[in-house]
Amino acid sequence: MTKASGFCGLLTSILLLFAAPAFAAHELKPGLWQDTETGTENGQPAKPEVTTNCLSAEEARDPIKTILKDADGKKCEALSAKENGNVVTVVMRCGDPKEMRIEIDMTVNFLSTRSYTGTMKSLVIFGGQKMTTEKTLASKWIAASCKK
């Protein structure tokens, strides 16, 4: 796994967990979700990624609480969260500036409790190097339980 794909996986997880902040109207269905992510990394086309994530009932009820805990060991804080109908825009920052810093600007469009789309721009600073991403995400619920 490359550094870039590891960061993108973390960013996708953040988007999934943070997708429905404290806006009760945008509750998601718990269970297995499939994410399809496309976009660029450092201005170059990135290989599309399809991943699955398990969203617990607790995370579906209060994802903001979940994400503001440590996301992959990196403390996150929401700088702003705005709602306009089914669209939520979030600006957040994660990590420790001395180790790894992630700045994220995302917009999520809730289509239903079983699907949403989103866009995300991020800046990752790690070991003195910067990486930028611009991603589009389509996420859909695919099962009530998550098989291990």
Image: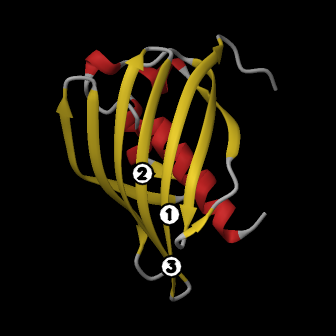
Residue furthest toward the top?
A: 144
Q: Amino acid at mark 2?
A: Met
Disc 3 vs disc 1: Cβ atoms closer than 8 Å? Answer: no
Where is residue 50, by image quadrant?
Answer: top right
Disc 1 vs disc 2: Cβ atoms closer than 8 Å? Answer: yes
Residue beneath the point at 25% across and 25% down:
23
Where is residue 117, by image quadrant?
Answer: top left
The residue wearing badge 3 is 99
How many numbered badges does the structure rendering display? 3
The residue wearing badge 2 is 120
The spot of residue 53 in percent (x, y) is 64, 33
| Crowd band around label 1 with a 10 angstrom C-alpha radius: few (<14), some (14–19), many (20+) | many
Residue beneath the point at 42% across and 45% down:
119
Where is residue 147, by image quadrant?
Answer: top right
Q: Does dot 2 land on a helix, a strand or a loop?
A: strand
Q: Is residue 114 visible?
A: yes
